[in-house]
Amino acid sequence: MGRNGMMGHRAVWAYSYLAIANGLMGNFDAAMEAAGDGTVLARERGRVLDQVHARWASALVQLYAENFEAAEDDARNAADLAEAHEFAWISTMIGIAQGNALSRLGGLDEGITLLEESASVGESTGMPVAVAWAKVYLSEIMTACGQNENARTLAQKSLMLSRKHGFKAVQVMSLQMLGRAQHRLKESKGFFEEAFGLSVEHSLRPRGAQIKAELGWIVSEMGGRGHGRELVSEANVMRKEIGIPVFGLPDV
């Protein structure tokens, strides 16, 4: 590969990771601009792996912005292209994004299958980041289905991996899922508080706003309804600032 090709390759991937980082922090305008620039450059350069990478980054940004149909469309396009060219490692990461999007859109069976396959491939090929993300998203699905024991097991695994390898965004979400999966409100509150503190430390605003709202609901159920409503209101301010839908307030 010549110098210009290498520079183009690096620029596409830089745009991709810039988009992902901004998406995690809730800077969605900057994230979508970077994802778009990466996609355009990848097409201009004509390198297929770069096009797959850019499309995967765009899918993640759409997930973080809660645009699940757009996320699934981007992930599916990336997956088709990656499969056609046998890009195994990135196919695993794309499967996580697609599985998450599908589960959000009601395709639980297909979403779970993709996430489980991604976790399995990640474990067999030594990709801890894939295992951690896949398991924490599976944990989220399990909590939504009321399977709290399975959710705790999955979240504990993802938490262990995220702490070992420094995956801060996964660590925050793992703590959040452990909070959801507890039987006792006091234990839930502790996990949510730890997760929120870490989200603030690393500027993970979309996830932090969600956690703060859930903490408000827990506080409200524990009898502190005034403080609970205050926490949810503050979470809604955060979500309005970054352009995602607000939550309902707990009943007084």
Image: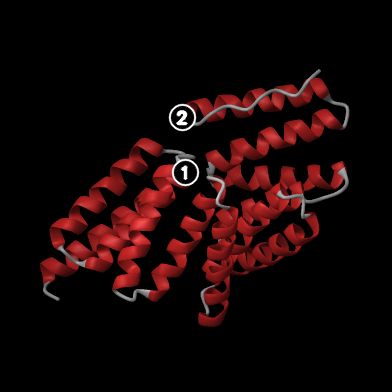
Quarter holding the C terminus is top right
Q: Residue 243 carries which label?
A: 2
The kind of residue on which mark 1 rests is Phe
Q: Residues within 10 Å of mark 1 (few under 14, many from 20)?
A: many
Element type at marker 2? loop
Position in image of residue 37 (x %, y %):
23, 48
Position in image of residue 133 (x %, y %):
56, 61
Frontmost residue, 141 versus 10: 141
Element type at marker 1? helix
Query: Residue visible at 86% across and 48% down?
Result: 183
Frontmost residue, 83 versus 197: 83
Q: Residue 68 carries which label?
A: 1
Q: Examine the rendered structure and indicate whether residue 230 appears above or below residue 51.
A: above
Of circles 1 and 2, which is in front? Answer: 1
Q: Would you say residue 140 is visible in this rendering?
A: yes
Left or right for 45, reference 140: left
